[in-house]
Amino acid sequence: MPHPSSVLLVSGDEIARYGFSDGHPFGTDRHEAFMRELHQSGLDGLVQRASARDATKEELESFHTPEYVAFVRERSAVGNGFLDGGDTPAKKGIYEAAVSVVGATLVGVEAIMRGDARRAFIPIAGLHHAARDRAAGFCVFNDCGVAIELLRSRHGLKRIAYVDIDAHHGDGVFYGFEAEPSVMFADLHEDGRYLYPGTGRADETGTGAAKGTKLNVPLPPDTDDDAFFAAWEGVEDYLRKGRPEFILLQCGADSLGGDPITHLKLTEEAHAHAARRLCALADEIGHGRVLAMGGGGYNRRNLARAWTRVVQSFLEAGRD
């Protein structure tokens, strides 16, 4: 049987409340859809459990500008309009919910760095579109970016890998670290000619000292598992050469067939494969550190199954 303490699940009401109402794709029911599937699979009893904490102002500002953090707090208190051009509502309480999402990711990071867990999964996390100074694409604060900054400053890591298999390009992370060679970035996403945010061309490989250090893999609409597995080989080669000290996986389920706002045709096998192979690579390097964040996904059945397969892969990789 898998070792129950090797995998940490960070979940609960604090992050479940992150989302929007009135038919918005990112509804607050996404957390429960996943937790129900995890329970039905019997895996919920095999993971270590933790709740989110609030990220501090200093932690938020390790990635975001102080002006933007203050803007979100003020608009959230009022509770009307949008934080961006029309995708991300400024609903009351969204600041507090977003602070919990960042805190949840940091709980996972801290547990792994302490050696209390080898892997961690946070279902409502991976808000990869938020830029340093603005919201975007349903994302208020970029927990991925904060985690990378704190792994560097707080834990002294010199080589951090961010891997993204969400259908949408992780532009907030990419441009946030575009000129930083110590941050490895590998993103398989639906080609930006067909899908928001329109970025992530194959020739976007970093700037300045980081030119040539980033990997963007745009996929055509209707890409299936076989094409994903073939593209994944390049991601693995890239990571193996870089030997990262920590691996972050944004495993958005909107890359599965049947998502209401995207056009890829993957199954949950793609997510299981990515999670399994990243664990094997982290173990091969010697540290075993992999943290996964749920990211996007707007078909509830898809996200429930894909994320459950990620947790299952983590558990299986932890067998003695």
Image (spheres, rainbow, N blue to C red):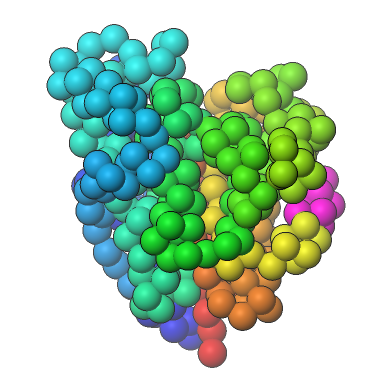
Magenta highlight: main SS: helix
- 265 in the magenta segment: no
Q: Residue at x 41, y 15 (%)?
A: 84
Outermost residue, left side:
77
- The front one of 92 and 209 is 209
Q: Residue at x 72, y 62 (%)?
A: 242
Q: Which residues are magenta?
A: 227-235
Relative side of 85 to 187, left or right: left
- Which residue sits at x=37%, y=31%? 65
The answer to whether residue 234 is above or below residue 202 is below
Picture coordinates of residue 152, whole percent (x, y):
48, 58
Is 201 on the left-hand or right-hand side of 18? right
- 119 in relation to 148, above or below: below
Residue 320 in the image: above or below residue 156: below
The answer to whether residue 284 is above or below residue 84 is below
| Residue 194 drawn at (x, y percent) | 71, 20
* Image coordinates for residue 289, horizontal then vertical, percent: 52, 70
In percent of width and height, residue 155 lies at 43, 65
Q: Residue at x 26, y 54 (%)?
A: 52
Q: Can residue 272 be seen by looking at this rendering?
A: no
**Callout count:** 0
